[in-house]
Image (cartoon, helix red, strand yellow):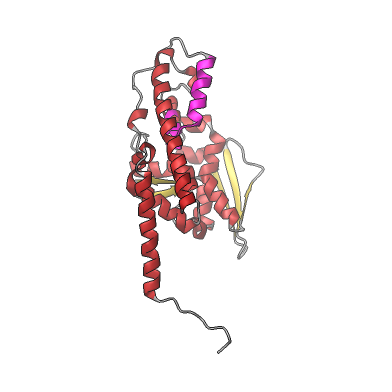
Amino acid sequence: MTSKQLTLIQPEDHFGSALKEIEQTEKMCGMLMKTAHYQKMGQEGIFAIVSKAKSLGINPLEALNGGLYFVQGKVGMSSEMMACLIRQAGHSITKDAKSNNSQVILHGKRADNGDTWTIVFSMEDAKRAGIAKMMYDKYPGVMLYNRAMSMLARQLFPDVIKGAGYTHDELREIARGKDEAPRFETKPEELQMSDAKVEEEKLISSEQYDELAALLEKCSPDCQQAINDWLVSKQMNSLQNLPLKMYESVKGKLTKNSVEYQQSVTLIEEIAVEA
């Protein structure tokens, strides 16, 4: 025997610790459900995201506000968070100089055993997968990068992402199936826009656009994505092309969401401080 004595952790200690962790998470979920923003996410979604964040060592605030997603029982992760966790673990990701708006090439290398992997995702791959929609026309480089990153993370760094290897868009596609028309997984009621055809008419002024853009920056990630999806579906490309008759309605929706979202951010910051 050495002078150091080992302390064995009994099974009941593990159980007690896990139970305490669950109780703390449930308490946090209850507090977050008091805000309108997180009510839309649902207690199940909040619990799943917070629990996964703890297992990954991610700040719950970062996880709940865009780092992690919950879609029909499955937790996913943003490509930015994947890259962050992979690099924090000491591994490397390199974007090939040949990457452009037609293809993205990522090289990954593990720090522990030197294993390497290269992922190439092109616009042709997107077309074959049936995902080369208008979003790829608008932000091709970004969308191709997101797909390449999630594929690289799943194939070379599964121990880092721990089962959360799909982006929000990928989870939504999985949930709705390949043949279903694109839609929001949980589209907030207040973000539902009229499906009436946008006709050529007087558009909002530059001052009105600046006002809406400033409001949108303060809205939740889901709201920003919903607005973007709606604009794309109407082939407006930008809020600058918003018909003047819709200005007050959109402004009201953005104002409501931005207030609720900022309140939720303040609340979760307070919870994080208390924890």
* Residue 180, magenta (yes or no): no
Q: How many marks?
A: 0
Which residue is the extreme one toward the front?
Answer: 274
Q: Which range of residues does the magenta coloring cover? A: 206-227
Residue 40, image x, y percentages: 34, 39
Q: Residue at x 57, y 50 (%)?
A: 84
Residue 267, image x, y percentages: 44, 42
Of 235 and 53, nearer the camera is 53
Residue 51, image x, y percentages: 41, 55
What kind of secondary structure does the magenta stretch mostly adopt? helix
Considering only vertical position in the picture, is 55 above or below 37?
below
**Quarter placement of the N terminus:** bottom right
> Is residue 136 visible to us here?
yes
Which residue is the extreme one toward the top?
Answer: 202
Which residue is the extreme one toward the right?
Answer: 97
Of 100 and 265, nearer the camera is 265
For residue 248, side relative to residue 209 (left or right): left
Which residue is the extreme one toward the bottom?
Answer: 1
Q: Residue at x 40, y 45 (%)?
A: 171
* Residue 216, magenta (yes or no): yes
Residue 212, image x, y percentages: 48, 22
> Is residue 162 visible to us here?
no
For residue 75, side relative to residue 88 (left or right): left
Residue 131's image quarter? Answer: top left
Considering only vertical position in the picture, is 256 above or below 241?
below
Considering only vertical position in the picture, is 51 above or below 97?
below
